[in-house]
Amino acid sequence: MRVLMTLLAVFASASIARAEDAALGQLLQAFAQRTHAHSDYVEQQFLKVLNRPIESRGELRYDAPDRLEKQTIEPRAETLIAAGAVLTLQRGSHRHVLQLADYPQIAPLIEGIRATLAGDRATLERLFHVDIDGNVEHWTLELVPRDPVTLQSVARIRIEGHGEELSRVEIGQTNGDRSLMTLRPSTAP
Amino acid sequence: MNRRGALAVALWLLFLGSASLIVLRAHYLADLSAFLPAHPTAAQQLLVDQLREGPASRLILGAVEGGDAATRAQLTRAFAARLRASDQFLAVDDGEPVTAERDREFLFTHRYTLSRDVDAERFSTAGLRKAIAATLDELATPAGALFAPLLTRDPTGEMLGILDTLENTPGPRRDAGVWTSADTRRSLLVVQTQAAGSDTDAQEHAIEFMRQTFAALQALGPDSTARLRLSGPGVFAVQARSRIQDAAVRLSAASTSLIVILLLLVYRSVPAVLLGLMPVLTGALAGIATVALGFGTVHGITLGFGITLIGESVDYSIYFFVQSRTGQSAAEEPGAVHTAAVRTGAGLARAQRWRRQVWPTVRLGVLTSICGFASLLASRFPGLAQLGAYSISGLVAAALVTRFVLPEIVPAQLVVRDLAPIGERLGRALARVRHPRALLLAVGMLAVAVLVVHRDSLWNRELSALSPVPAADLAFDALLRRDLGTADVRDLVVVGGPDLESVLRDAERVGVSLDRLVESGQLGGYDSPANYLPSRSTQERRRASLPDPATLQLRLRAATQGLAIGGDRLGPFVAAVTAARADAPLSGADLRGTSLATGFEALILHRGSTWNALLPLHALPGAEDRPLDTAALRAALATSAVPAATVLDLKQESDALYAGYLSEAIRLSAAGFAAIVVLLCLVLRSARRVLRVLVPLILAVLCVAAALALAGRQLTILHLIGMLLVVAVGSNYALFFALPDGGARPVTIAALALANVATVIGFGLLAFSGVPVLEALGCTVAPGALLALLFSAMGSAARTHA
């Protein structure tokens, strides 16, 4: 009897795993169909040294296969463009071009969001332990970095969404600081 | 041999001895300086300094190719590590973040000395509040988020400000930790040598060290298919030197042996051949010795040019041997009395006859050549002036030896083969050419037509046209530079002064003006040595503006009222400012070990008691191809009140340099040609005869220029010099054909044909030298000399027909 129960439990968990696997595949496939995404965002940062969160607003754009643009509008204008392995920062008249690989603090965040939007499962699973929860209507992806160096700064990334739209991206730092980005499909073209 | 003869021979031997000594002890140069002005303007001097000693001249670019990516990356890392351990290199960069950590630490530690925002205003209560509020705003942006961990130590955001002012280039992509070309087929590294680029010996040593180190590493590893390719100014200089030396040795050996074989076939006499080479040897020694004495150093390119003299100076002895044959004299001068019993008398007689009949024409030929080359002596460019000095002294020496020494040392019984039959055959072949005059006219008109069609693309107007580097190597270099993102800087502001402190102070002042241009969107950005190392006075001013801990704490409490961060959290900031107040001033030595040292040294030039700070300017993004608005720049500089600041457009400056060089060469060649015309008019005293000499030469030059244009070759200065040589060499032929007694005697034709073959061999070989400048010379003179002879002969035939 106990053996049977154990077996059942194993089968059950296996089927749950399969179901999760299928859901992730389905979700990423849906993302892979899209070549363009454009959202408005509001981001809050909760830092331990601060006595209140700081807030910023802007737009997030994605163009297949690998271009992600985060344009901060308030409190000050700054644009970050990740295209391939190159990161471009436009700050006023200053323009910095960086290698994504040189910035392990932000590379996984960008790669995580970009791979999700691209529906690139291989990259996603190479960089993170991926967990999916919920259904296609309302899902949550939990990404935990595999790289121990990255883990020293980023503990996990949670991406929530409805269908093919992202609604929340929460990044938890290892030191307890965190940021929360709330997204809405952009009304602009 | 009479007393005068003995004296001539003795003087000659003495000359050979002393010239050999000078040649052996002369100093030889193989860099581009042959083509740089001897008395440059200030801007040109800077350009020359940059080319010779500037940081760009010390760069060696390396590429590891072949094998698989992992092996290449591993090999490159190991290679870079070994090079870093050698003291021959100032910097070795293969994309590994060896200094990134140290760079960041240095900038962060010295942020209150380096940040341009630090002043008394910034550390007032209002200033602190403004700076901290701005930093908090920054935190909300992607870049600012990177600095969140530094917030309590750097709440005023100095680090971010410093990074904004420092130059930021993208750098190449990276695979397995090392720089990789865009096509991923090679890993890349950049090395800066300790030695200046103009120190070719040291560069050669460093390059050899790199190759051996790489070979040793490769022997350790499993993969032997990977190979190292090097490029850069030093590599080019070393290659050019060895190529020129190689060409000079190989080609002079080849052309000497070919000419010796030719002469042996013709003369059928070993002593005649050996004696015939005496004027050549003397001429070459005289040429080098004259240049060494007159200029102090001999340019490699002059040596390369020297071998061409073999082809021309051997002509004199050919005329001597062929035209002073005994048999000929007996046949043509029935009045001459000589018996077989008085052999020495016979030798002397024929030498005397040669002196009387042939020497005046040869002498006029030499004088014509001198007129052509003398104009080059006036050139501002040592390379051209050396060519002139070399040619004149070499030809004069060769001619004098032929005239005064050869007749004395030629054994009386020496008889070379009679070439009259060959001459007769050539003469008959020539006579078969129908309507030679019409043919010449047609050829000339055709050549002019081709030149008119190609008139806009005839001349190559870039300095690189003179480069001794083959086009394929330049293309590989350009490819590596594109991959490395180290494009050439085009515009600079240059600030001069008597010491480092003063040029740094002026660079800071100029920077204030440039900042305004950047803010108003007229300039993309700029780099300044003062960003890496501020002047002492600025450093002191910044330190003096830092408040003591008690004052700072008091101000912070007030400044952070209502902000998202409380003053009580900023203890690390107060500690950092307190420590910065006690810091010793930064000097260039403090930068060592960071990549900032390379950046700083690249922007400071030091020569004798003159210091120059360079501020490279960058166009606005997207406008990189358009030239900067230099008028706006100059106006902005005028407001900075730094009189020693100048705007320099390097590309324009170097092209102007070459354009000046080219137009000067054209002017000098024209003057040389005019001198030749005047000389011929004075000597020949007949417009008709002058034309007879000149028309074939002009036609030959036009035809060669047209042929080069048709072949798609753009003409450079070396082609121009080649044309001058065509006139100089060809004038000998033309003069013989223009002699009043119808110079087309068979033996003369034979002598000229032989001399012509020797010249064509000498110059023709240059066309295969692998040195572009020498190739240009070869492919102009070899066909030009041939045509000059042919046209002169045709002109003469036309007159005989008529």
Image: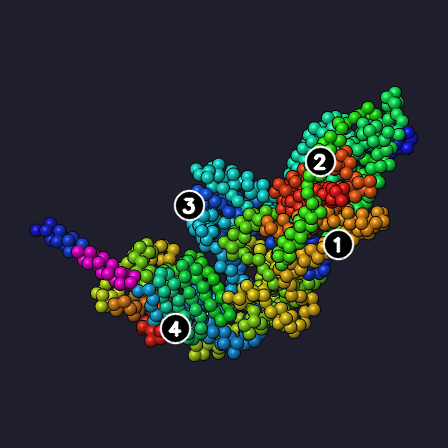
* Image mark for residue A58: 4
Q: Nearer the viewer, mark 3 or mark 1?
A: 1
Q: Is the magenta stretch mostly helix, strand or loop?
A: helix
> In the image, which residues are magenta?
A15-33
The residue type indicated by label 1 comes to Ala
The tag earlier along the polypeptide, 3 or 1, is 3
Q: Name the residue under label 2.
A: B428
Q: Nearer the viewer, mark 2 or mark 1?
A: 2
User: Does residue B595 sit above or below B418 in this rendering?
Assistant: below
Q: Which of marks 2 and 3 is in front?
A: 2
Q: Nearer the viewer, mark 4 or mark 1?
A: 1
Mark 2–mark 1 Cα distance, whole angstroms, equals 37 Å
| Badges 3 and 1, same chain | yes
Number of marks drawn: 4
Q: Do the residues labelled 3 and 1 touch (CB within 8 Å)?
A: no
Q: Name the residue under label 3.
A: B70
